[in-house]
Image (tube, grey):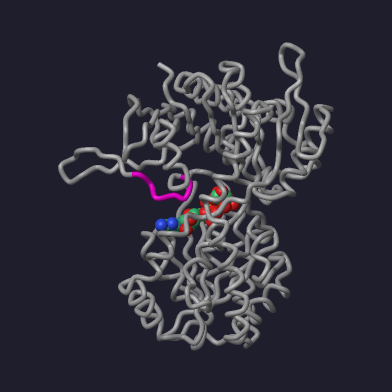
Amino acid sequence: MAVAEFVVVANRLPVDRVVGPDGEETWRTSPGGLVAALEPMMRSANGAWVGWAGQADLELEPFEADGIDLIPITLSLSEVEDYYEGFANDTIWPLYHDVIAPPQFHREWWEAYVRVNRRFAQAAADAVAPDGTVWVHDYQLQLVPQMVRELRPDVTIGYFHHIPFPAHGLYAQLPWRDQVLQGLLGADVIGFQRAQDATYFLTAVRRRLRYEVKGPGIAVPGPDGQMRTAVARAFPISIDTEPYLALAAREDVQARAAEIRASLGNPRCILLGVDRLDYTKGIRHRIKAYGELIEDGRLDVEDVTLIQVASPSRERVDAYVHLRDEIELLVARINGDHDTVGHSAIRYLHQGFPREEMVALYLAADVMLVTALRDGMNLVAKEYVATRADDRGVLVLSEFTGAADELRQAVRVNPHDIDGLKDAIMQAIEMTPAEQSKRMRALRRRVLENDVNAWSSSFLAALADARRR
Ligand code: GDG
C-alpha cells in the first residue's frame, strides 16, 4: 500500500547488518551524512528508504531501523556482479571519472542495470503516497527517475548525482548514452555537485536529444506531447558537521591524536591521506611526489611522516586489485629505501577505522593531502577542515574535486603535475602559523555554513518549486 509522503531511493540502505555474539541479527544505521541530512525529513514526512542491504540473495520484508522505514531490494549474485560491480562500478564509474581507468562495455551488464533499476523504481512507485516525493540518488540508479514517472506520473521526482558528469566527448562513448539521459530526465530536478557537471549534462541533452535548453531549464516532451520543464543545476553536497565538531572537542580524541604523534616518534610534520582505495583519488601521484621529495633531500624521514589510510573498496573489481598491488609496491619501495629503524616514511593502513579514530588522525595531521584526479565533491577535505577548531593545519586540494569550487583558501594542486605537487606539499609544510590560521578560518566558515542540512534544504526547496510549476 502506498503510504510514504517522501521516498529516498539509493543503491544501499542506510544500515549495516550486525550479527551478535549469539548469532542474532540486528541492523545498525550507518553514520553517513546523507542519513543525518534526510532523517528529519524522513520522520516528519512519513518517509521510507528503498535500497539494497548489501548482501546477495537476501530476501527481506520491509522493516524499521531507528525510526526509518526500510524497503529492501533483493539482488541475486549475478545481479551484484553485472549491475553493481559491472555496469555501475566498471562502466559508469570510470567513464564518468574521465576514463582514468578504461570503462568496460558489456551488453549483459547493461541488461542487468535496466532490470535492477526497474525493480528499484517499482518498489518506490509502490511505496509513495499520492502526490508524494521520490528522491533518487546516484549513478547506480540513473534510469529510475523516468521509470518512476511512467509508473506514477502524480509524484515529484528528484535525482542527485554524487559523482562527476563527464564532458560530451567522453560521455558519447557510452553505447546507451541516450537511454541514460532519458532516464535522468524523468526527474523534475537533477542535481549535480559542480556547475561544470550540470553544464556538461545540459550540453549532452542538447546535442544528443535536441531538447530545448534555457539556463538550467530543459523542455522535456511527455508521452501525451505536452512539455514539462526539468531543471539541472549544482547543489554542492557537504558533511554533517555536528558529530565532527563534537568528536574534535572530546578530550579522549585529542589525547588519541597526541598518542598517534608520539607513536610516530613526534615528527615535526605529519601529512595525512584518507581515501577509499580508488584509482580516482590520486593516491599514487601523492605517494610518488612525496617519495621524490625524500629522494631529493627536501624532506627527511626523521622530521616528516605520511600516514595513508586506504580503506578497502570494490575488491572484486579487477582495476582495484591492480591498483592495490601498484600502490603497495610503491609504498614498500619508498619505505625500504628510506626508513630508519625508528622512523617510517609512510605509515600505510589498508583498513577501515571508526569515526573517532578518523577524527584523531585529522587532529594529528599538520597537512591533509587530497589529490584526486577526479572527484564529485570529496568529503574528506571538508571533514578535515571541520575538525580544525584551532584554525591550524593546511589543506592541499586537487582542483579536480568538487570541493575545490568552494574551498578556495586551500593550497590548490594539479595532481598530474608531480613537480607542482611537490612544491605544493613543501609550501604546506613550510606555511607560517599566521598564514595557516588566515586560510583555515575562511575554509571553516564555508564548511560550517554550507553543511549537509543546508544542502538537503536547498535541494528540497528546488523540488518544492518544481511541484508548484
Ligand atoms: C562519493 C563521491 C562525494 C573513508 N574511509 C573511512 C571512512 N571514510 C569516509 C570518509 C568520508 C567518506 O568515507 C568518503 O567520502 P568522499 O567524498 O571522500 O568519497 P567517496 O566515497 O568516493 O564518495 C564523492 C561523495 O560520494 C558524497 O556525495 O563527495 O566525490 O565519489 O566521509 O570519512 N570513514 C570511516 N573509516 C574509514 O576507514 N569511519
Give whichever of 193, 188 is nearer the camera. 188
Q: Residue at x 50, y 79 (%)?
A: 270
Relative to 457, is 242 on the left or the right? left
Give whichever of 360, 353 is nearer the camera. 360
Magenta stretch containing residue 33, yes or no? yes
Q: Quadrant of the C terminus?
A: top right
Residue 380 higher or lower than 262, as above or below: above
Q: Residue at x 65, y 45 (%)?
A: 94
Give whichever of 31, 99 is nearer the camera. 31
- Whether residue 364 appears in this view of the structure is yes
- Name of the residue lying farthest toward the left: 22
Residue 185 percent location from the top left of the image: 69, 28
Residue 306 percent location from the top left of the image: 51, 75
Relative to 365, is 181 on the left or the right? right
Residue 103 higher or lower than 109, as above or below: below
Residue 118 percent location from the top left of the image: 54, 21
Relative to 213, is 421 on the left or the right? left
